[in-house]
Amino acid sequence: MEPFRQHIFVCTQGKAEGVTCCPGNGSLRVLQALEQELTAQGLDDEVQVTTCGCLGLCDDGPVLITYPEGVWYHKVREEDVPEVVNSHLRLGKIVSRIASNDLSAMNAQAKDHRDRYRAMVRARDEAGTLPDDLNEMIRGFMPSRAVLTALELDVFTAVGAGATAETVADQIQCDSRATEMLLNALASLKLLDKKDGMFFCTPVSARFFADGTRDNARPALMHTANLWHRWSTLTECVQAGTSVKKDGRDQNSVTAFIAAMDRNARERAAAVVNAVGVAGVRRMLDLGGGSGAYSIAFARALPELQSEILDQGDVVALAQKFIRNAGLSDRVTARIGDMRQDPLGENYDLILLSAICHMFSPDENRKLLRRVYNALAPKGRVVAQDFILEPSKTAPRFAALFSLNMLVGTLAGSSYSEPEFTGWLQGAGFSDVRRLRVPGPAGLMVGVRAE
């Protein structure tokens, strides 16, 4: 029994560079074309598409299998997809020119592939060869650094609608030979297309990395580029037990940081507001509120809500611009202060600490949460959003790696576990302490002040 009328499997099993595989022959493009064509022909509710591992016919890829008919298609190209969808999936007529009919040959080819693969695995193991996935993890900084350099130099804007390496080099004021090497590397990463010596942005790089587009993420991603320099000191930080980079932050780094935080917050704000709720909230304090994205979201969810952001001076100036652009200057305000020592105010119904606790030591968080408790009205709530570790502190992976980000960037910050947050909140006097799970890498810890 099948929940869909037909089911298509598309091989997307990657192999080591130089080894024939379906993705290397274009199966990912075929997959995208297939999904688009099914939607265009109104069949996406009747035909399920599933990616799968190696089907054993690598030299004949890309390979598709359609069920319940059990038809194997080989050497499928993007231009074949409309015919497969219309002829086979709509009208029930097999596209014979790309269908595999010699079952014994297919069986022999698949077995031969299996045997050669097993022999290769044995030989690599006996030679002590580093596994591909481990080697890729170790060298993962290479593609990352290439993209970050391209963002720092604003390469994708320079490429625009198409340009030669020489034109791009002149635009970004860099060496022509080195620029071409970078552009070729970006093309290998599928972030640029190259044709007849001309480079072109791909749809994804044009959308997210080039100036002037609605979804341009470059300003926010410059924060990641800045992080690279701190992460390069990780060895020294592990030896010292704290950040070793002593230089202060400049306005460019602050602007990039707030842009990154704003982008993250806008993506999550609706889910956070929905999870927390606004019932009974009239006054809100947004500690370290950055761009004000969360205050803005809460204010939009409840017209009577007033929110106040407390942050550092160079951040408050940026926050006020975001607030004005949102048209909420009458209900969302921002003031300069240090949340660890300056007055917080009193009688707030909700205090939000988003991406705050990971910057501080456990003792600093205990003291901060006691201050927060005293600033709340009776039955007021505190909501701490952060990358919350499981009790083992080895998962989720993002939170475990983010601990290192705090090691290289702060004096005593870290990612913390749910039991640690629970202990701090209860120790500060909060009751009804609980964790709320929302989509994405961060979670919410909530506590209520007693009446």
Image: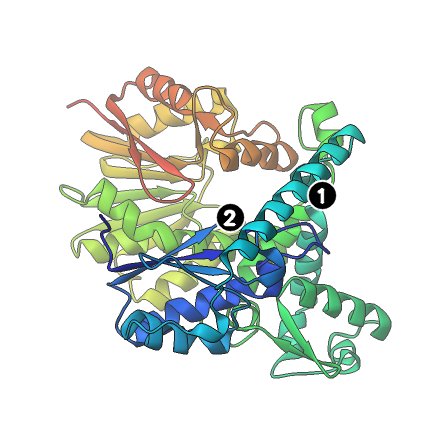
Image quadrant containing the C terminus: top left
Q: Say if 104 sits above or below 168 in the image.
A: above
The answer to whether residue 265 shows anywhere in this view is yes
x and y, in percent, of residue 231 in the image = 68, 41
Amino acid at pointer 1:
Asp
What kind of element bears circle 2?
loop
Question: Where residue 247 is drawn, which disc sits there?
Answer: 1
The answer to whether residue 217 shows anywhere in this view is no
What kind of element bears circle 1?
loop
Q: Nearer the viewer, residue 300 or 307?
A: 300
x and y, in percent, of residue 415 in the image = 50, 30
Amino acid at pointer 2:
Gly
Give the residue displayed 54% in from the left and 63% down from the top: 62
Question: Where residue 53 is drawn, which disc sits there?
Answer: 2
Q: Say if 30 sits above or below 344 in the image.
A: below
Give the residue displayed 60% in from the left and 56% down from the top: 58
Q: Say if 300 sits above or below 419 in the image.
A: below
Q: Is residue 313 left or right of residue 270?
A: right
Total labels drawn: 2
Q: Nearer the viewer, residue 363 or 70?
A: 70
- Crowd around label 1: few <14 · some 14–19 · many ≥20 (10 Å): few
Q: Nearer the viewer, residue 280 or 128?
A: 128
